[in-house]
Amino acid sequence: MNTKYIDLISQTYDFPQDEFSLKNDELHFHNIDLMELVRTYGAPLKFTYLPKISDNIKRTKEWFNEAITKQNYKGDYNYCYCTKSSHFKHVLDEALKNDIHIETSSAFDIDIVNRLKDQGKITKDTYVVCNGFKRDQYVSNIANLINGGHEKCIPVIDNYEEIALLSKEIKKDFKVGIRIASEEEPKFEFYTSRLGIGYKNIIPFYEDQIKNNDQVELKMLHFFINTGIRDNAYYWNELQKCLRVYTRLKKVCPSLDSLNIGGGFPIKNSLAFEYDYQYMIDEVINQIKLTCEEEDVSVPHIFTEFGSFTVGESGGAIYEVLYQKQQNDREKWNMINSSFITTLPDSWAISKRFIMLALNRWQDKYERVLLGGMTCDSDDYYNSEQHMNAIYLPKYEKEDPLYIGFFNTGAYQETIGGFGGLQHCLIPSPKHILIQKNDDGSLSTELFSEQQKSEDLLKILGYHGI
Ligand SMILES: Cc1ncc(COP(=O)(O)O)c(C=O)c1O
């Protein structure tokens, strides 16, 4: 019987895969020698493999360009990066190498835009699409950007008061988008998203607040489905409803020329992940084109705001298994040297699953385990993988430490986990390593931030000088 971890993985999945391989029985990710990373920096650690960001942007642009060419679609495609999925400078620096645009969600985001403008990384040709609920500082920051001449800043109107608030502070003509409040999936706790304006109210809103307003021009309709761009009846139905609004609105509002289909491109969360990106994009473009033809209106330029897809697959987290607790004859808890709650908050908050693999000891026998974090919170655990209802890892050996990696964790985990701030049970944020590819294909690593120290946490807690 094959009971080695290597057999389990290679018999359950296609292995090796593009980004995962074994060398000397140790796991490599995009040719990063992960155990070498552990030997150099220790664990726990988080890392960002920056080239993956550019890679995913390029792939997406190619998929859209192919669909547009194939279908002779007469609109352009604009890739925006949704900054809230990771605001770090290294992420934006990498993303902005690829001639992209930016989507913001709050006031401070605009300060980031201004910094990047000062450095020439964002230019007057970069669209800055401003989503989110806008009041006070966010309105002022958007107004300052537009007043300063950034004509490609497009606030996307989320509620009935925003046009008046923006008009009060913007001293020029400006363009806006309107966000459609989508109907949520039937299993959701509520029917209509709180974000945006309901389908039926879009045209009355336009007639009431924009049509006769000389200062404001409607350019974009924005549509984002919380559950993502998926090949299911719910998604296609919502897209159709959105396209009906688009074509009706276009007939009364000639300046409308863009459709923003939001974020929600899925990322690889399992070694068995399957998603046909090209097919989905072909079909989205096809649906838009067909509906516009039926209604005899010109097709819109397309905008997307991919957050997870831009940055998710660049990130990883590595932990050491410190100890095994056998709490009954079936349940073995492998205790990691950090916390899931603080370092991978989506894993407990929304039961998100990531790719999880052992980094070493692939020739050893495997066992079924549960993974526990170091906080004394009973929710601090990880107990299954996306396509395997359990977790299997090389058998725990006190004298032969086991290291495990979680992959494609680069989106949202730092911001939601409060990077560098207070942490549950004061378990510190791990160190963070940036990995870049050199011109000759070799990799270089750089420590972005150290593991938090006791002083860092005590200072936040007010224990100055005590
Ligand atoms: C308006 C908007 N655009 C884009 C995104 C990015 O979504 P994702 O990270 O799934 O691509 C979000 C995420 O919540 C969003 O609210």
Image: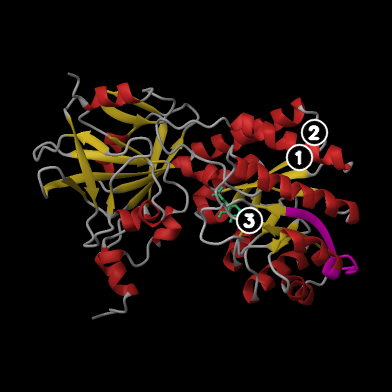
Give the vertical position of 464 relative to 366 (above or below). Answer: below
Q: Is residue 64 left or right of residue 354?
A: right
Which residue lies under the disc numbered 2? 73
Q: Which residues are magenta?
A: 208-221
Tell me which amino acid carries mark 1: Ile
State how far apart marks 2 and 1 are (Cα).
9 Å
Query: What is the quadrant of residue 388 in the picture?
Result: top left
What residue lies at 49% left-to-right and 54% top-to-bottom?
Answer: 88
Provide the secondary structure element on which disc 3 rests.
loop
Is residue 215 inside the magenta stretch? yes
- First of labels 1, 3 by sequence position: 3
Provide the secondary structure element on which disc 2 rests.
loop
What residue lies at 55% left-to-right and 34% top-to-bottom?
Answer: 55
Q: Are marks 1 and 3 in contact (CB under 8 Å)?
A: no
Q: Quadrant of the C terminus?
A: bottom left
Provide the secondary structure element on which disc 1 rests.
helix
- First of labels 2, 1 by sequence position: 2
Q: Is residue 420 visible?
A: yes
Q: Is mark 3 within 8 Å of ligand 1?
A: no
Question: Percent from the top left, x then y, of residue 113?
Answer: 63, 59
State how far apart marks 2 and 3 are (Cα).
28 Å
Q: Are marks 2 and 1 in contact (CB under 8 Å)?
A: yes
* Residue closest to the eye, 343 or 220: 220
Crowdedness near tag 1: few (<14), some (14–19) or many (≥20) residues, C-alpha within 10 Å: many
Which residue lies under the disc numbered 1? 288
Q: Is mark 1 within 8 Å of ligand 1?
A: no
Which residue lies under the disc numbered 3? 183
Query: What is the quadrant of residue 309 in the picture?
Result: top right
Q: Is residue 436 left or right of residue 376?
A: right
Tell me which amino acid carries mark 3: Glu
Question: Percent from the top left, x then y, of residue 405?
Answer: 31, 40
